[in-house]
Image: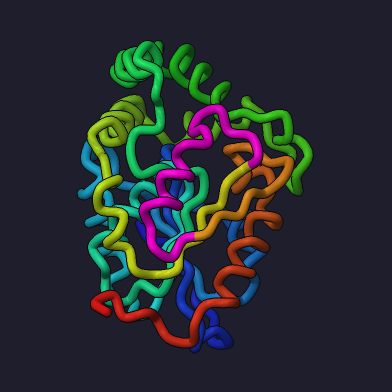
Amino acid sequence: MNTATTANTAEKSPTLVFIPCLSGAPWSAEQLAPYGEAAKRTLRLPEGVRDIERYADHVENAIADLDDYVLVGDSFGANIALALATRRPQGLRALVLSGGFAANPIDSKPLKALAQVMGKAPGPIYRQLTLRAHVHRLASPFDGEGQVHWSEARSRELFLANTPAASYGARVSAIFAADYVDVLGRIQVPTLILTPAHDVLIGENAAKIMLAGIPDAREVVLPRTGHMFRFSHPATYAGAVTDFTAALPATRQDADA
């Protein structure tokens, strides 16, 4: 299901396309409101898909009518946005990747093994054990300081309401299988890597890899924010995205140049 908002006053600006996190839920009205009258669109991720390329296909099909847009991907959605950007789609003007990664960000072998096991957990274990462990790693000391008071309980509610156990497991499998490190150079549009100050889930190395591999990439670290900063600090997050898009060239860079 697609949710779209387009403003007549923003006809000459690219449409902002917001790609969901691991929960699969479209960006909420609360998270989209700080972008004001900008043309914007979001969507829900398909269920049970185990391949990042198929998620990228889903997004590409959902925005096939757009000829000028910026992909804004958060966390798992950043991996999807990055995958689509490596295809050099004709309408892509720029890329925003927040809390994202080019390949599985978990370096620890025990944690990788644990994540794979937890990703296969049946419904009751998923709801009572897997999600509690997952949202604990999403949390930061700054989640209660933003425009929206966020918490581990609210993160768990987000997944319970939007993410069946089978889809959670499929998306974890997609993360483990995807690796775009060697093709980052294909991305030929301005790229903002938006990083929270505190992120135990993703870690610092993920942003460094993308900065090194994407030719026109820069990083902005938002102080006193955590991995869930899209939820806890929607106005702060939007301000960084808006500053970036306001400085874009008047026309999209030619991906074949």
Point out residue 28 in the picture as x, y percentages from the top left corner: 56, 53
Colour mapping used in the image: rainbow
Query: Residue 120 lies in magenta, yes or no?
Result: no
* Magenta-span inclusion, residue 212: yes
Image side of residue 5 versus residue 172, left or right? right
Q: Quadrant of the C terminus?
A: bottom left
Is any part of residue 122 visible from this angle?
no
**Residue, x 55% and y 54% (percent of image)?**
219
**Residue 9: horizontal and vertical position, in percent?**
58, 87
State the residue lying farthest toward the right: 145
Residue 126 vs 204, above or below: the answer is above
Which contiguous range is marked in magenta? 197-217
Q: Residue at x 35, y 15 (%)?
A: 109
Of residue 214 and residue 131, the one placed in the foreground of this image is 214
Quarter residue 226 falls in: top right
Q: Nearer the viewer, residue 211 or 33?
A: 211
Determine if residue 106 is in view.
Answer: yes
